[in-house]
Amino acid sequence: MSWTIAEHADAEALAEACATRLGAALDEALRQRGCAVLAAAGGRTAPPILRRLAAQPRDWSAVTVAPTDERWVAAEHPDSNLRALREAFAGAPGLRWQPLVPPRPQGPADATLANTAFTLFDEAFDAVLLGMGGDGHFASLFPGAPTPADALAADGRADAVAVVPDPLPASAPHARVSLTLARLLRSRCLLLAASGADKRAVLRRAAEAGADPRRWPVAALLHAPGAPLEIHWSP
């Protein structure tokens, strides 16, 4: 994959640039097809972007938003990505939602709902907003996690996989359901937003030839064939 890196002066400039780019992608989809589908990350970097995006005027009732990944928790749980996305999009009336997990998950994490749902959204996403952790993970595709072999394969056949991070993150110790690299690559506009010198260093390592996705999962994204990836970074 080819990629570009836009370096912004601060987090506010990054948020404004990403919101503008995502808004343009959604508006192009609405003009061409009358509807749009966005997959968006949780975490700390995405909400300021999404709040700015939600403030833009458009027919939000024609837009569907899905998390790129979700914790195996109830929809109202404080750690739910869907809940965080709903809060960020509070200013977008009529928006449609596509969850990745049941409203009240039971038993082991299971990606059946997500795989069934994204069979319905067979076309490419109109836009995807990804974040990245300091360990190089994106969505919930973590280094060393016991995920199916094709979760980080650009030509994988599954849309979503169940993930149990090892170790579980202290801030959100839950199993997850994550969209796969192959499904995320099927997007007309693919953005990765990251802040901080540590994440810039991870991106440099992952961009090197031969970088191991098992150590730096984002390397699989950077080196995958397909549409260009737009990286937005700020200190």
Image: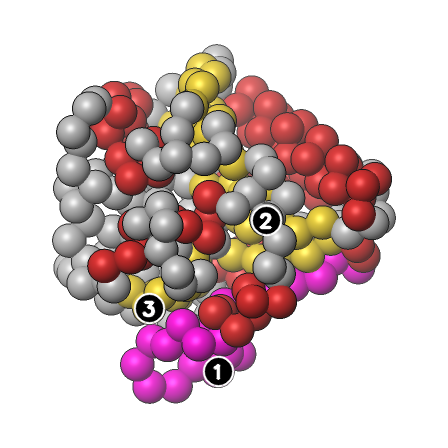
> Does residue 187 appear to the left or right of 62 in the view shown?
left
Is 206 situated above or below 82?
above
Residue 234 or 185: which is nearer the viewer? Answer: 185
The quadrant the C terminus occupies is top left
Numbered circles on residues, count:
3
Residue named by callout 2: 124
Which stretch did the figure color magenta?
94-113
Q: Could you tell me residue 38's position as x and y percent?
A: 62, 49
Q: Amino acid at mark 3?
A: Ala
Q: CB of mark 2 within 8 Å of CB of mark 1?
A: no
Q: CA distance from mark 3 to mark 1?
A: 16 Å
Which quadrant of the view contains residue 109?
bottom left
Depth-wise, is mark 2 or mark 1 nearer the camera?
Answer: 2
Q: Which residue is tagged 1?
A: 104
Which image quarter holds the N terminus? Answer: top left
Q: Mark 3 packing: few (<14 Cα in 10 Å), some, or many (20+)?
A: many
Sequence-wise, the earlier of marks 2 and 1 is 1
Earlier sequence position, callout 3 versus callout 2: 2
**For residue 136: magenta?**
no
Question: What residue lies at 48% left-to-right and 82% top-to-bottom?
Answer: 104
Res 96 quadrant in image: bottom right
Which numbered dot is residue 162?
3
**Secondary structure mostly taken by the magenta-highlighted segment of the chain:** loop
Look at discs 3 and 1 and give the one toward the viewer. 3
